[in-house]
Image (cartoon, rainbow, N blue to C red):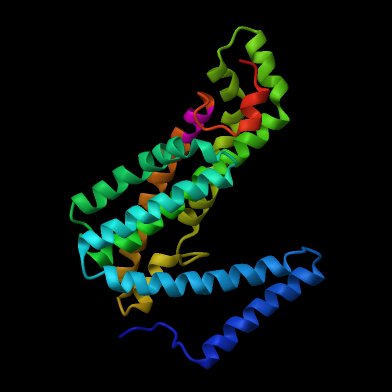
Amino acid sequence: MSQAPDVSWPFGLVLIALVAVAMLAARFGGLGLGRDLCTAALRAAIQLAVVALVIAAVLSRWWASALFATLMFAVGTFTAARRIGAPRSWPWVGIALAGGVAPVLALVFGSGVVPRNGAGIVPIAGMVIGGSMIALSLTGRRAFSALRQDRDLVEAGLSLGLQQRPAILEVIAPHSPEAMTPVLDQTRTVGLVTLPGAFIGVLLGGGSAIDAGTAQLLVLVGLLAAQTVTVALTKHLIAVDRIMPADIRAALPP
């Protein structure tokens, strides 16, 4: 029996109250995010309503679910490229993202551990793609911040005879592991501090606690693998000037 919340007028009132709490906290805390919080909540409601209708239509066919997962990957690629300020590098962003996502999904679905149907493809692919997109965005933003701040270190390395790749790596490599902090923290504290989405989703769907635990473990280990590969590839592609904002590329010595 499903334990999902009923969509009724109390549900709507609770959502409005939660947004109001966030906006009031932002106002009294001087965060200046009131409009952003309201817009984000409204956008989430609209997007989820549309996506729920689409997913309901595609879940009955595995090929439609695979096509929807491909669409999620494309959106994730362009979103990550925009977030890191390198929209023209989107093909290489896609390569870095695919390098982490593809082997994980191939193992999960190829082994038969998760059924190759709509109910398996869409949520698992969505969580792996979304987590890898976040890791890529964190890697790029931290790396480009370091390059802007420590450009002189790159120039010093080049003047000492280093090629561009090792000179850039000297600056960005210490910051790359930071992109793995969220997934590492989530994995270390799962069941103790947090109960992530896959666990809650299975429980709300009427599954047992054992089912929820195994699903969450698969997702977390899959995210560890996918994000590690994505971060490593992103770091390498930044170092060889494949993923790079235009302003940094123009400022770096040839």
Q: Quadrant of residue 140?
A: top right
Q: Quadrant of the C terminus?
A: top right
Indicate the position of residue 128 as horizontal and vertical percent values: 39, 53
Q: Is residue 171 above or below residue 80?
A: above
Where 211 sits versus 11, above or below? above
Which residue is depicted at the point 60% across and 7% down? 161
Residue found at the very far front of the displayed protein? 88
Report whether 117 appears left or right of 228: left
Residue at 68 percent across and 16 percent down: it is 155
Q: How far from the left and from the top, in percent, is residue 206?
A: 31, 80
Indicate whether residue 237 is drawn in magenta.
Answer: yes
Q: Is residue 12 visible?
A: yes
User: Which residue is painted at 21% across and 66% down in the image?
Assistant: 61
Residue 247 spot, x, y in % from top left = 66, 31
Residue positioned 63% across, 12% down in the render: 158
Q: Nearer the viewer, residue 87 or 238?
A: 87
Q: Magenta segment, which residues? A: 234-238
- The answer to whether 90 is drawn above or below residue 23 in the figure is above
Residue 221 in the magenta stretch? The answer is no
Viewed as shown, does residue 181 lie left or right of 36? left
